[in-house]
Image (cartoon, rainbow, N blue to C red):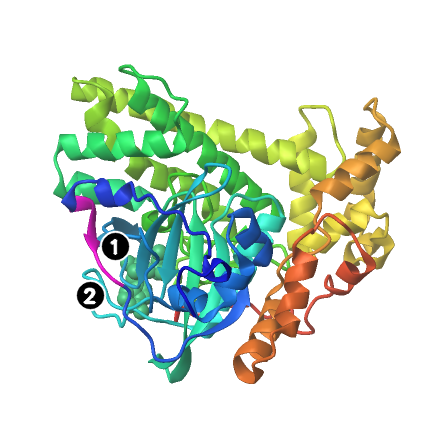
């Protein structure tokens, strides 16, 4: 193979702005090479949109890059420093098993982080081995692509390679590396880290960097840091509302897992809810229910408060004025969140206009779902396709009463029944990444090297609002769906 050979030019175009930040922010770190890398999945559609050559990415040299065995020209690998509140407690963290190769500039001029997750030890690894196992990396791949299909801002997954090495968890597992694409890996925890270890100038540098990368339209001037805070709040309010609307439970909303750019990041013990239950948690270590479904909007606010605290020194010369500005901005979060949530819920019910009683109508339906232990996604599908008689709810007098009220509500808007149906089709996914389907795909891949189950699942998840007959097959629940599903933190 000749490196200059056209066929092996993957098309990477690196420009590494993060590497140009002051030393405090990151440490140059190369990935640790692995024994015998093998490409097990490549996101061809994503690769193409990034301006990369699929053929070259699949070549030995291309795979060596995904494995950390070869560094593309112009990449400047580093591990990012950050801190974070984990389950409410402040901790020093940093990329303990991820290496940022650099920022790739796409043909459209977009700047995207290319990160190898599971690439070996870094100065921030603490006791960890810096590695990841295959199951969790494939899991992140599936769920992140499912989120993308649902139109929810998220990091993307470009490829997974196996390393040919074992990682030791409860037992020996096959090692793997995920190539993750993000508009940036700036986290609330990045700001917390700089607040803790840097000075005001460092915070300004970080804020300026964030503005340049994510909010270039915010104008020069004294208010720009307040605008930054307001914009980050807006994006999180929208993001978390979108999670709630599809029943997504992140599982570990620590501040280091909240991205400043507003993308969903760090898929660990996350899952989509089957049976509606606001108290549902998916992380086996979240015994208090801190990150339960119904608590996600509150935690979003809590995390944003940590972000605001880091910005306070930039908001006003007078500290008490600065705190007041931050508080006013934070007070908007709940309103913004509620606006997105109720608009989304109205759409899920085919409602175009606004009536004050809508909130009660929505909450009553959710209460019935909770009371009768019914599936969240499928209940909305049944309402969309008028198949409610097949659901457990239909036999109950409360639901009959609710249904009448809903029909009357639809009758009080100008839009036709057809228009309402169309809105519902486009607002209620035919398919979500159900736990049992994800587990089935992972088992085939990890235990048998059969990636066809995963490929099929990815295919139906890629366009969840298509409502194809094949997708209907993926809407069925597992036999034991009443059992609480848990993902364990051995990621
Ligand atoms: P997470 O729970 O994935 O958000 O990770 C929390 C922190 O633990 C981050 O700083 C990770 O980089 C670090 N970490 C997780 N797994 C490992 C590992 N196997 N080796 C080193 N650091 C790790
Ligand atoms: Mg994390």
The residue wearing badge 1 is 78
Distance from Cα at disc 2 to Cα at disc 1: 16 Å
Image height check: is 471 above or below 450? above
Q: Residue at x 24, y 22 (%)?
A: 315
Q: Image quadrant for the C terminus?
A: bottom left
Residue range of the region highlighted in magenta in the rendering: 24-30
Q: Which mark is residue 349?
A: none
Find out if the beta carbon at label 1 lies less than 8 Å from the nearest ligand 1 atom: no
The residue wearing badge 2 is 126
View quadrant of ligand 1: bottom left
Q: Image quadrant for the N terminus?
A: bottom left
Q: Residue at x 80, y 46 (%)?
A: 383
Q: Residues within 10 Å of mark 2 (few under 14, many from 20)?
A: few
Name the front one of labels 2 and 1. 1
Q: Residue at x 74, y 38 (%)?
A: 349
Image height check: is 250 above or below 474? above
Question: 12 and 414: which one is in front?
Answer: 12
Q: Left or right? Give the position of 448 relative to 462.
A: left
Task: Give the secondary structure at mark 1.
Answer: strand
Q: Is residue 192 visible?
A: no
The number of numbered badges drawn on the structure is 2
Q: Residues within 10 Å of mark 1 (few under 14, many from 20)?
A: many
Find out if the beta carbon at label 2 lies less than 8 Å from the nearest ligand 1 atom: yes
């Amino acid at each position: 193979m000749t490196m200059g050979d056209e066929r092996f030019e993957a098309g990477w175009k690196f420009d590494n702005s993060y590497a140009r930040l002051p030393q405090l922010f990151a440490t140059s770190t190369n990935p640790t090479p692995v024994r015998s890398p093998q490409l097990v999945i490549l996101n061809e559609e994503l690769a193409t949109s990034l301006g990369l050559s699929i053929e070259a990415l699949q070549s030995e040299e291309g795979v060596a890059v995904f494995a950390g065995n070869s560094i593309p020209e112009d990449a400047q690998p580093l591990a990012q420093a950050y801190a974070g509140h984990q389950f409410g407690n402040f901790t020093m963290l940093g990329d303990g098993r991820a290496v940022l190769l650099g920022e790739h500039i796409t043909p459209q001029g977009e700047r995207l982080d290319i990160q190898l997750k599971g690439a070996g030890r870094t100065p921030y690894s603490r006791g960890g081995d810096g590695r990841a196992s295959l199951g969790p990396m494939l899991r992140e791949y599936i769920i992140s692509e499912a989120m993308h299909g649902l139109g929810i801002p998220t990091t993307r997954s470009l490829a997974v390679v196996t390393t040919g090495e074992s990682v030791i968890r409860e037992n020996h597992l096959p090692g793997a590396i995920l190539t993750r694409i993000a508009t940036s890996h700036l986290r609330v925890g990045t700001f917390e880290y700089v607040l803790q270890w840097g000075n005001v100038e460092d915070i300004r540098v970080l804020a300026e960097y964030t503005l340049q990368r994510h909010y270039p339209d915010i104008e020069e001037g004294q208010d720009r840091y307040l605008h930054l805070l307001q914009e980050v709040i807006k994006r999180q309010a929208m993001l978390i509302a979108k999670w709630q609307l599809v029943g997504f439970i992140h599982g570990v909303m620590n501040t280091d897992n909240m991205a400043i750019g507003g993308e969903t990041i760090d898929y660990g013990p996350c899952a989509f809810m089957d049976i509606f239950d606001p108290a549902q948690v998916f992380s086996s270590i979240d015994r208090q229910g801190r990150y339960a479904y119904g608590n996600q909007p509150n935690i979003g606010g809590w995390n944003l408060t940590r972000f605001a605290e880091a910005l306070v020194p930039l908001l006003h010369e007078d500290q008490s004025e600065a705190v007041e500005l931050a508080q006013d901005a934070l007070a908007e979060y709940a309103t913004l969140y509620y606006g997105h949530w109720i608009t989304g819920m109205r759409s899920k019910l085919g409602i175009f206009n606004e009536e004050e009683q809508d909130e009660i109508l929505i909450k009553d339906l959710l209460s019935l779902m909770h009371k009768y232990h019914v599936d969240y996604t499928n209940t909305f599908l049944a309402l969309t396709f008028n198949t409610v008689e097949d659901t457990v709810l239909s036999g109950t007098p409360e639901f009959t009463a609710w249904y009448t009220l809903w029909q009357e509500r639809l009758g009080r808007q100008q839009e036709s029944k057809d228009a309402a149906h169309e809105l519902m089709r486009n607002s209620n996914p035919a398919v979500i990444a159900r736990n049992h389907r994800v587990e089935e795909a992972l088992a085939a891949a990890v235990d048998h090297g059969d990636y066809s189950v995963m490929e099929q699942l990815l295919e139906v998840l890629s366009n969840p609002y298509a409502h194809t007959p094949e997708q209907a097959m993926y809407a069925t629940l597992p036999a034991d769906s009443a059992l609480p599903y848990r993902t364990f933190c051995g990621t």
